[in-house]
Image (spheres, rainbow, N blue to C red):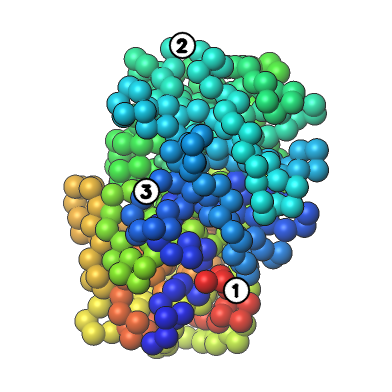
Amino acid sequence: MSEQNLRPDFHITGQMGWINDPNGLVKFKDEYHVFFQYYSSNVYWGPMHWGHVKSRDLLNWERLPVALFPDEQDDGCFSGTAVVWKDRLWLMYTSYKENGGGENIRQLQAIASSKDGVHFTKHGIVIGEKELPAEYSPCDFRDPKLFIEGDVIYCLVAARRRDGRGRILLFSSEDMFEWKFVFDLFGTDSGGIMIECPDYNKDLGLLTYCEQFQPAVGSKHLNEHSTFYRLGKLDCAAHTHTFGESDIIDYGFDFYAAQIFKDTPVMIGWLNMWDRNVPYSKYGFAGMLTVPRKLSVKEGRLWQEPLYKGRNAVTFNAAEVSDRAVNGVIEIEVENLRRLELKLRAGGGAYTLITVADGELTFDRSVSGAPIKGKETDALSVAGIRKMPVDERKKHKITVVLDLYSVEIFADGRALSSVICPDFSADAIKFSADADSCIYKRCDVSDSMSMEN
Ligand code: FRU
């Protein structure tokens, strides 16, 4: 197998080494830019750079030079945001300074700008200790999100009360350099120890954010860290909001730190999770971003559909199908479903199993290939299982996006994303359904979606 075939076909990865959160999702001069937390020197987290890719169609990605580097200003350039303002592309990121560790760590917000969208100049810290009210800790103050309303530039930043837990703070500016504190969005502590990566999309009326170490509720958010959303609007001038209850964005093992493009309702997340082994890192890279997801609000909740372009579809109008593929997209349409089973990447005793029955989709990676272990100790996590609710409907469409090391499942607007690491030779697919009618369709995406290595 050639070196190139060891990489995912169309998921965004670093050229080598480690990546985590997507950063600064932005459209600039008709091109979509995605940055990401990047450490090219090894397959684990290290001094953070901003890797950079761009695309005209959100399907084919071209690699650009690393956009931000640690230097005398920052020991690491942590997660952040991008905005187009006065014909320039502006990045705001968290400037991380170790300062000997512990209470001396500083996480403060810095900016950089670019005229061409490729080369960036750092301008230093603009939301620092002076702007942060004394009750919040400058050790845990990170992941800014910029948005513009009229003449005012706003910034959401995750913070932690010195005597408490996570908060989301709003700051404002008129010139990108001078910032003032506006208000603490919820004014109460988060469920998890710290909040990370807040994002707000006004058009969708959607706030997303992560909670670290949020205790599970039933079989929901079993991951050590989870990404949530709330629907509602932020009234920055009145210091109020209408955000409702929080819900989980993705039911899988591996989804975190999602961001949304401003004028295009598309979200991308990190297709991985902290504190898990990454078996495919033996090929020199660790971490991928999810396939872009088109977002809408339907039936009072967030609705996600994968963006892809399929070709050469094979279609079976049958309740039992045997097929083969290691990547591509499978679309299943069923009517009056009683039970469905989809076995993927089967071979040599390994397989990944998706079942739908009794209003629930179950994903099982217990024998999917090289074992993947996390810190979670609950029975389902240890067994390699994740579950997602499925609505009671006459018709269902289930879409499975399959790449060399990942399975992303979409059903009724919900998503479940997980890493798998089978042998390359494990390519058998077995589908069976007990339903009044069913269509199994698989399309190839290799000519229409790509990530330059
Ligand atoms: C989230 C996160 C952010 C931080 C970044 C560091 O996954 O912990 O809070 O900015 O990763 O790489």
- The span from disc 3 to disc 1 (Cα, nearest Å) is 30 Å
Q: Which residue is mark 2?
A: 134
- In what element is the residue under mark 3? loop
Q: Is residue 185 visible?
A: yes
Q: On the rendered image, what quadrant is the N terminus found in?
A: bottom left
Q: Relative to residue 241, is residue 291 depicted above or below? A: below
User: Which label is found at residue 213?
Assistant: none
- Mark closer to the chain start, 1 or 2: 2
Residue type, mark 1 in image: Met
Q: Residue at x 60, y 26 (%)?
A: 126
98 and 33: which is toward the camera = 98
Q: How many marks?
A: 3
**Location of residue 148 in the rendering, given as x and y in whole percent from the top left corner:** 73, 33
Q: Are marks 3 and 1 in contact (CB under 8 Å)?
A: no
Residue type, mark 3 in image: Gly
375 to the left or right of 10: left
- The span from disc 3 to disc 2 (Cα, nearest Å) is 30 Å
Q: Are marks 1 and 2 in contact (CB under 8 Å)?
A: no
Q: Residue at x 52, y 47 (%)?
A: 69
Q: Which residue is mark 3?
A: 46
- In what element is the residue under mark 1? loop
**Location of residue 252 in the rendering, given as x and y in whole percent from the top left corner:** 38, 55
10 and 125: which is toward the camera = 125
- Mark closer to the chain start, 3 or 2: 3
Q: Is residue 391 visible?
A: no
Quadrant in the rendering for residue 165? top left
Q: Which residue is mark 1?
A: 449
